Image: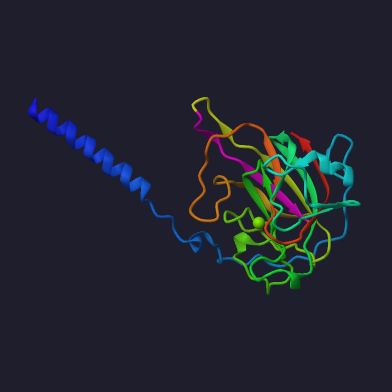
Amino acid sequence: MKKLLISILFLYNSGLAFAQSVKEEKLPPPSATEDWSVKPPLVTPGESYPQPPSDAILLYSGTGDAAKWEHPNGSPVKWQSDGDALTIVPKATDIRTKQKFGNIQLHLEWRTPDPSEDKDFNRGNSGVLIMGLYELQIYESWNYNSRIYYNGQAGSVYKQHAPLVNAARKPQTWQTYDVIFEAPIFRADKTLEKPAYMTVFHNNVLILNHVELKGPMVYQGYPKYQYHDAKLPLQLQEHGSRVSFRNIWVREL
Ligand code: MG
């Protein structure tokens, strides 16, 4: 009996120690997940801006479509919406669609501002957060002087995958992303059955070929999946730079 009590006490104590060590787990520095290994070669894209096909769900084609978006706290969009462009207002927070999506084909066009108005390491910084979680980075990457780790430049899955090549256009020029996104699948017990995958064309050039996502975007530490709904809003990131968007549409797959 005494032996049993001692082993129960031992188990209890080691359980406590484990809980303590989980609590005190230190995140690695943000630099731990920066990839500087292979510089994506430059490719000059062709010129074309496709129009949406007949079955596309238009998410932004002009001022009236701002009503299809909201800030994460549910308030109406405070970004500048004029003509066919929607421009970030710094500190106004991200925006997300009212409609929720799972597997999609996504097209959007984006334009970074005059680089002189942004700070170093934040040149044209924005991002497409698919399902509000999985970030396809937007960044001024035409000029290599705006140095950032390769898995943080335009066309990266932020801090997970660098693009195969750098197909960026000049700042203040419209650029396109065409994305095929496969949402992750979770089992009934909420564990991961199948991770998310992403294929991306930047200015019509393939830059990510069915890459496996390691989990939602994290700036610090390593990504890991957590159960979430099968459909979630599409989100555009506000990161202090006045990036513009236009011609945003999706097709549900
Ligand atoms: Mg970003």
Instruction: Decide if residue 62 is in sight here.
Output: no
Q: How is the image coloured?
A: rainbow
Above or below for 97 versus 158: above
Query: In the depicted view, which residue is nearer to us: 167 or 187?
Result: 187
* Left or right of residue 44, residue 194 in this image: left
Query: In the depicted view, which residue is nearer to us: 69 or 159?
Result: 69
Instruction: Decide if residue 18 is in sight here.
Output: yes
Q: Quick check: is 192 in the magenta stretch?
A: yes
Above or below for 69 versus 82: above
In the rendered image, residue 129, in percent from the top left (x then y), is placed at 67, 47
Number of numbered discs present? 0
Question: Which residue occupies 69% across, 60% down?
Answer: 240
Question: Which residue occupies 46% across, 61% down?
Answer: 29
Question: Which residue occupies 62% across, 67% down?
Answer: 148
Residue at the extreme right of the image, as rendered: 83
Question: Which residue occupies 66% across, 39% down?
Answer: 182
Query: In the depicted view, which residue is nearer to us: 117 or 233?
Result: 117
Above or below for 9 versus 141: above
Q: Quick check: is 199 in the magenta stretch?
A: yes
- The part of the image, by quadrant, that contains residue 72 is top right
* Left or right of residue 107, residue 155 in this image: left
In the rendered image, residue 2, in percent from the top left (x then y), is placed at 8, 28
User: Which quadrant of the figure contains the N terminus?
Assistant: top left
Majority secondary structure in the magenta region: strand
* Left or right of residue 181, residue 3 in this image: left
Residue at the extreme left of the image, as rendered: 2
Q: Magenta span covers which residues?
A: 190-202
In the rendered image, residue 190, in percent from the top left (x then y), is placed at 51, 30
- The part of the image, by quadrant, that contains residue 61 is top right
Above or below for 134 versus 11: below
User: Which quadrant of the figure contains the C terminus?
Assistant: top right
Which quadrant of the figure shows ligand 1?
Answer: bottom right
